Amino acid sequence: MAPPAPLKRPPSKCDRTLPYTYEGWVDILEGKGRDPVYDHYFSDTLCGLVECLDEENVDPGCVTLFSDYRGRETELDTSVLLDADGRWLKRPELCHALEQHYAVTRDERYRGHVEKGPCLFEDRDRRGDGPVW
């Protein structure tokens, strides 16, 4: 019997310079419990995660975002994803903000997000999922 075929991943998920997935943690006890109890939100793309959080009316100040990057979870700066009024940005403004942030910081966690031209994440599912706990 032949071994199972390896899973086919989108090309962007094979690129080790790009985050593999994105996650948001929301303490549903809002810091009032002895220990936090988290709802988790997931997406293959940062824009998908932000869109999901916005649709679920998750306050940006109540969520901690992570990227699975180079084999480890790395916290992300949520402020990059917000407009001047502190609300979640939407595509294409979100893509532009991420593109500008990468241009200034050269922080690889934000690479590949572009407002115009080919997005390095277009081969991924852009929907988010959650809450899951």
Image (cartoon, rainbow, N blue to C red):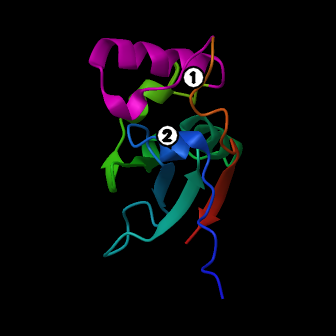
Give whichever of 56, 121 is nearer the camera: 121
The spot of residue 113 in percent (x, y) is 52, 24
The spot of residue 52 in percent (x, y) is 66, 45
Helix, strand or loop status at disc 2: helix
Helix, strand or loop status at disc 1: helix
Mark 1 packing: few (<14 Cα in 10 Å), some, or many (20+)?
Answer: many
Vertical order, 94 against 13 (above or below): above
Sequence-first disc among 1 and 2: 2
Q: Quadrant of residue 104?
A: top left
Residue depicted at x 52% and y 20%: 85
Give whichever of 102, 34 is nearer the camera: 102
The spot of residue 107 in percent (x, y) is 30, 27
Q: Amino acid at mark 1?
A: Leu
Residue depicted at x 57% and y 30%: 88
Q: Amino acid at mark 2?
A: Pro
- In the picture, measured across the screen, residue 114 lies left or right of residue 65, that is right
Give whichever of 4, 19 is nearer the camera: 4
Residue extent of the magenta highlight:
90-116
- In the picture, measured across the screen, residue 118 lies left or right of residue 14, that is right
Q: Is residue 36 magenta?
A: no
Kindly give the residue lying farthest to the bottom in the view shown. Answer: 1
The Cα atoms of the two marked residues, 1 and 2, are separated by 14 Å
Q: Quadrant of residue 18?
A: top left
Q: Is residue 91 magenta?
A: yes
Residue depicted at x 38% and y 67%: 32
Can you identify the residue that label 2 sits on? 60
Can you identify the residue that label 1 sits on? 94
Total tally of numbered discs in the picture: 2
